[in-house]
Amino acid sequence: MKITVCMCRVPDTATRIVIAASGTSIETQGVQYIVNPFDEFALEEAIKLKEKAPGSTVTVFTVGKDDAQKDLKTALAKGADAAVIIKADGALDASAVARLLADAITAAGGTDAVWCGKQSVEDDAAAVGPMLAALLDLPCVTRLVGFESDGATFKATREIEGGREEIGGAFPCVFTADKGLNKPRQAGLKEIMAAGKKPLTSTTGTAAAATVVVGMAPPAERPAGRIVGNGAAAVAPVIDLLRNESKVI
């Protein structure tokens, strides 16, 4: 089985974000980047699937620059067999990233299973996985919190509004991983050393963005809080404010 994982680098959620002078991007100087947390779950599930199907391989793809090598080497140390950096110039949106990934996966000979994080914590679009599935003409199961497979078929559990849904199917398929699907493993020293001998290559691609960022702004400051009373005497004023001012009830 040929298993594919799509990973991306995002600003650390603990990093202080500053909007650049252009007003259409963030200031990258001093920003700490990490692997998208949801992609960590995708990688772990891909490696687990490989371990259940002898002879399978896991290849990790990322759209980025050479600074992604560190993260890809970590993925190789955890159990991936090969990694590819897809380099592209210009502004990229979800549709362009999906196109670049689809072209690279197709050029590599296709795939039996694609794993992505359910969304990037950078923009929360949750669009690359489903778009990639459409471009590859494959079915897609999103927001997985449970997964079982015998190597030919699978049973997936996904989050839906108000509950969970179980879906059965056969490969090939695209999956997006949600928090709780698994616990990502850590690589040991032996695996880290061995990762240096695994192939890490780069390729180039072109894809036009379908959308452009016209402006970015920080969220508006919250108004100062108010104390309207104490104890039971505060109940009526709070209800009045929620109903007539905030209009939430």
Image: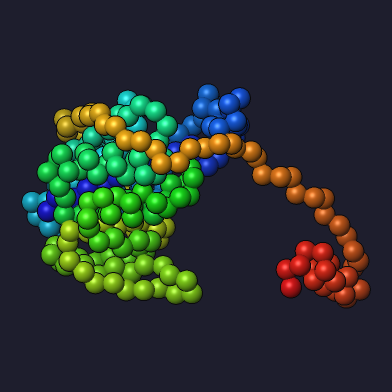
User: Residue 232 location, x and y as percent?
Assistant: 88, 75
Q: Is residue 219 left or right of residue 22?
A: right
Residue 133 quadrant:
bottom left
Residue 77 quadrant:
top left
Q: Residue at x 87, y 75 (%)?
A: 236
Question: Taking the image as drawn, is residue 190 in sight?
Answer: no
Q: Given the current orientation, which residue lies at the most extreme left position?
A: 55
Q: Residue at x 23, y 34 (%)?
A: 84
Q: Is residue 241 above or below residue 94?
A: below
Q: Is residue 226 left or right of residue 58?
A: right
User: Residue 18 location, x and y as percent?
Assistant: 60, 31
Question: Taking the image as drawn, is residue 173 in sight?
Answer: yes
User: Residue 6 location, x and y as percent?
Assistant: 30, 45
Residue 104 quadrant:
top left
Q: Residue at x 32, y 74 (%)?
A: 166
User: Residue 222 location, x and y as percent?
Assistant: 75, 49
Q: Count the marks: how many?
A: 0
Q: Is residue 55 left or right of residue 169?
A: left
Q: How is the image coloured?
A: rainbow
Observer-nearest residue: 50 or 96? 96
Observer-nearest residue: 217 or 82? 217
Q: Residue at x 53, y 24 (%)?
A: 29
Which image quarter is the C terminus in? bottom right
Observer-nearest residue: 120 or 30? 120
Q: Is residue 81 left or right of residue 117?
A: left
Q: Is residue 124 above or below residue 160?
A: above
Q: Is residue 20 above or below residue 233?
A: above
